[in-house]
Image (spheres, rainbow, N blue to C red):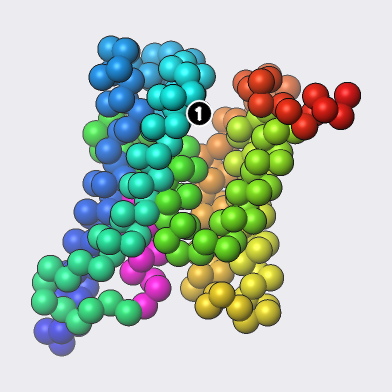
Amino acid sequence: MSTLYNSMINIAVIIILSYLAGSIPTSIIVCKAVKGIDIRKHGSGNAGATNVFRVMGWKTGIFVVFIDIFKGFAATEWISRLNLSGGAPQSSMLVPILAGAAAVIGHCFTIFAGFKGGKGIATSTGMLIALFPVPLLVSAASFAVVLLTSGYVSLSSLTAAIVFPVTMTALYINNTDNIDQTALIFSIIIAVFIFYTHRSNIKRLIAGNENRFEKLRILAKKNR
């Protein structure tokens, strides 16, 4: 009973630390440090990497993306392995999934900025690099194709969110890449969560007034 209790305490600590790591408001800190502005008062008003690209340029945007990816990876790969309570070491994939998910939730609903953060794509990417690199690569490829064709980051993210569980399902059916039911259910949950965080973008896409990066529409320009 004591071992189970210690393990539960340890998992709770891991989740809290992962949430706090994900909650670090990278875009707000970086934009304040670089240009002295609150990114939430410029562009789309979102404290995410896409808005940083739009307002601050690609160099600052890439830096923010890298840090946000690192937050998700660190929580999933390292924080999930902590054993602070003396409980039994965690061997299940469930703990890294919980740690990564906590980091993504922290990014989207950061305690350090009124529970309003980014959309969670970069932090989710970091988590998936640690957990499921092959399905992530397939999703990343779909993201790139849609982005270079349409110029919509939001549409690209939503497409990747759909492709990810589809790829996971295919791997699960073929019993490859160590995909189990927990991982499969998780892939569906994270896709639904990404759609939830992009609900305002979906409304703008339907209305035809979503912001677009015209310079990124390379494939569309070549096909004209």
The residue tagged with tag 1: helix, strand or loop? helix
Residue at image location 20% in from the left, 76% down from the top: 7
Q: Is residue 222 left or right of residue 178?
A: right
- Residue 154 at x, y = what percent? 61, 34
Q: Residue at x 28, y 12 (%)?
A: 36
Q: Is residue 102 visible?
A: no
Q: Is residue 93 magenta?
A: yes
Which quadrant holds the C terminus? Answer: top right
Query: Which of the 4 quarters of the picture holds residue 95?
Result: bottom left
Tell me if residue 149 comes above or below residue 91 in the rendering.
above
- Dominant SS of magenta comes to helix
* In magenta segment, residue 192: no
Name which residue lies at 37% across and 54% down.
73
The residue at which mark 1 appears reads as 50
Q: How many marks?
A: 1
Furthest-bottom residue in this view: 1
- Is 53 displayed left or right of 219 in the figure? left
Neighbourhood count class around disc 1 (C-alpha, 10 Å): few under 14, some 14–19, many 20 upward: many
Image x and y of residue 16, in percent = 23, 55
The quadrant in which the N terminus is found is bottom left
Spot the residue most to the right. Answer: 224
Q: Amino acid at mark 1?
A: Thr
Q: Residue at x 80, y 24 (%)?
A: 221
Query: Residue 177 in the image: x percent, y percent?
Result: 56, 75
- Image-based side of 17 in relation to 40, left or right: left
On the picture, is 222 further left or further right than 169? right
Res. 133 visible in picture: yes
Q: Position of residue 189 (x, y in %)?
A: 52, 58
What residue span does the magenta drawing correspond to?
92-104
